[in-house]
Image (cartoon, rainbow, N blue to C red):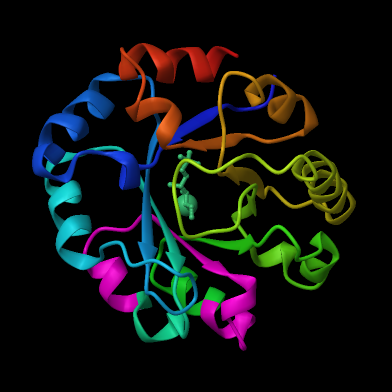
Amino acid sequence: MLKRIIAPSILSADFAYLKKDIEMIERSQADWIHIDVMDGRFVPNISFAFPVLKSVRKHSKKFLDVHLMIVEPEKFIIPFIENGADLITLHWEASSHLHRNISLIKDHGIKAGVALNPSTPVSFLEDSIQDLDIVLIMSVNPGFGGQKFIENTYKKIVETKELIERKNTPTLIEVDGGISLENASKLYDCGAQVLVAGNTVFTAEDPEKMIEKLKQA
Ligand code: DX5
Ligand code: ZN
């Protein structure tokens, strides 16, 4: 069986009680924590950045998965690394010089990923897949938690898996947006290995148990 990683997105956490939510994630079977950074330019919403990442790092031993939904991400790669990121994922649509940005991240000894919006084809990664630790397939239009899953995602996961196999790279496939117990097992079957979940985890009566269920779906 392929590796299964659950990455709860703290975008849906209660920020007044963030430590409590981080402690829940620490106890849970989650492997990663997904950190959604939004700038009000690349996406029509603003979330949070360095102080929150720094605080999460202080209280967590999990792998910190930083998803940058920002224009000109190259301006902020170093401070995100300094504040505790283990992985930085940039948007293909926001990077004019993808190769340079990916190299900058990897030269600092952390993992690098590229995210694709729902309408961006997988084939656009043909010449960069060999450099990527992660491909993040967006299954909603980025900007908000709690949106409806886009069905075309399954096909894109299969295409990404084919590309990875053809190029023989160890790249992981991550999926983000609208993930629930309804679609998790089909996502794994298509080849996804990392599932991000915000709303599904944080609105659950027992979030810790929900993480376990998503992992075993
Ligand atoms: C959307 C973010 C997601 C979001 C997922 O722009 O990238 O990570 O937090 O939230 P849910 O699981 O609620 O769709
Ligand atoms: Zn995200």
The C terminus - image quarter: top right
Q: Is residue 96 magenta?
A: yes
* Residue 133, placed above or below residue 206: below
Could you say which is closer to the camera, residue 118 or residue 55? Answer: 118
Residue 32: x percent and y percent? 39, 38
- Residue at 46%, 85% (x, y): give it: 72
The residues colored magenta run: 78-101
The quadrant where residue 183 appears: top right
Task: Give the quarter of the image for residue 207.
Answer: top left
- The image shows residue 6, relative to residue 96, as above or below, that is above
Asked whether residue 86 is drawn in magenta, I would say yes
Q: Identify which residue is drawn at 61% across, 87% down.
A: 97
Residue 24 placement (x, y as % from top left): 22, 24
Return the x and y of residue 126 as percentages of the image width and height.
83, 68
Task: Tally the marks.
Answer: 0
**What is the x, y in percent for residue 66?**
39, 57
On screen, residue 137 versus residue 69, left or right, reads right
Can residue 76 be seen at all in this image of the molecule? yes
Rendered image quadrant of residue 100: bottom right
